[in-house]
Amino acid sequence: MSGEVPPCTDIVVVGAGAAGLFAATWAARTCPDLRVTVVDGAKSLGAKILVAGGGRCNVTHHVVDERDYRGANPAAIRAVLRRFPVEATIRFFAECGVELKREATGKLFPVTDKARTVLDALLGAAAAAGVHVLHPCRVEAIRAHGDTSGAWLELSTQHGPMRARCVVLCTGGMSLPRSGSDGGGFLLARALGHTTTPLIEPALVPLTLPDGHWLRQLSGVSLPASITIALATGAKAQVHGKPLKPIEGAVLCTHFGLSGPAILDASRHWIHANAADAAARLVIQWLQGISADTLDQRLLEAKGRSVLAALHGLLPERFLRAACAEAQVDAAAGVQQISRDRRQGLARLLCACDVMPNGTRGFTAAETTAGGIPLDEVDGTTMMSRCTDNLFICGEMLDVDGRIGGFSFQWAWASGHIAGCAAAERARSLRAAVIGDDPSRRIGEASR
């Protein structure tokens, strides 16, 4: 383990992921005389950061607002995001020597195209601010305690006890459990009076299809598409009380089902809809901008040509042949030889393909977590718990999940910044309130 467990510290940040390193850095910058310690149970720090964005780390998006997130309290999400906007994120990383570039999708990546650049910058900023990092050191319990020296939070760790004036809890949700975010943080929060949403599900996760599904035979094929989530009633899935707009982007066919940016975005909404309506499904428009009726008319007008020839250039031949087989249409047959029902069935398959996933790849393949601690259980201006004094919660542990494109990271930066700054101010005021403010009891100064 790097370093010894200090018996006392001003602030303990539990979790050294994106939100945790950010919170610790801003806490130390806000009050340099405080001792700030980050504790993380993972053997290697920053695993989620290193795998994000295909190993490039999509730091944020050029435009971010509450509509890019799913959660029960859009107004609270908006308030947090406004406290630390995208411009502040860009400025922070620039000060750390990390220049960001904007791609056509609006995503911002480091110009090095290496996630390691981002992680090194975060660790460097924390070290420069005087943050102490302890790992691997798992926190097993947190208890509120008060004595003659004031209020404390006591932590039990695998390497011994420690106590702090304030604790920032940001262990992540349950996605990529090998990184350390295995749901343990939720247990710590529940023991301190918090609740979690009824559903805690993987988000931004590939979807699985039943054995034998025709799309599973197209592993490796990636196509731009438009996805709508439909319920058994025929209604569209909703987000923030409004019908969800079609999700556009690349869809990747795999040996297990579907993946790619559009599927990852759709997954968070499909999971939510499926929990309430087991018949929730995806409607995929492989030919964007073309209706089934329009395509059917195009086929009708292609007299003297084969079905495959009539569709040539619209989609890859491998995909078209598989679609024809699924629609029970002979791709080599002349259009006029195909029955009306099968011709229209093929048109629907290409323009409004009904797909019923049978599950997800789970938390081990998810990029983030849907659900968690309700935002109403923290003060949005400080991220301090409404259940336990001097406890702050930020990042993925809260019931907020963003769409693909750097939005989850922006939530981590914004909520981590607020929690870190507020925890520092709180710890400083708690220390100053100690009777006589005896310098010998100023653990932040005495331990340096």
Image: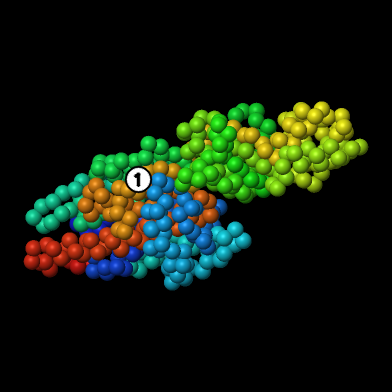
Residue drawn at the location 37% of the way across and 40% of the way down: 197
Instruction: From this view, report whether residue 189 is shown above or below residue 216.
Output: below
- Measured as percent of width and height from the top left, residue 171 is found at 36, 49
Instruction: From this view, report whether residue 90 is shown above or below residue 410.
Output: below
Q: How many numbered discs sit on the rendered protein?
A: 1
Residue drawn at the location 31% of the way across and 41% of the way down: 195
Instruction: From this view, report whether residue 133 is shown above or below residue 199.
Output: below
| Outermost residue to the right | 304
- Measured as percent of width and height from the top left, residue 240 is found at 46, 46
Residue drawn at the location 42% of the way across and 47% of the way down: 71
Amino acid type, mark 1? Pro
Q: Identify the secondary structure beneath mark 1.
A: loop
Is residue 19 something that shows in the picture? no
Q: Is residue 310 left or right of residue 286?
A: right
In front: 210, or 274?
A: 274
Q: Which image quadrant is residue 122 in?
A: bottom left
Q: Quadrant of the C terminus?
A: bottom left
Is residue 275 something that shows in the picture? yes
Q: Which image quadrant is residue 330 in?
A: top right
In front: 29, or 232?
A: 232
Q: Residues within 10 Å of mark 1 (few under 14, many from 20)?
A: some
Q: Which image quadrant is residue 228 in?
A: top right
Q: Is residue 289 left or right of residue 139?
A: right
In front: 269, or 264?
A: 269
- Measured as percent of width and height from the top left, residue 34 is found at 24, 65
Q: Which residue is mark 1?
A: 374
Judging from the image, the colouring scheme is rainbow
- Measured as percent of width and height from the top left, residue 174 is found at 41, 42
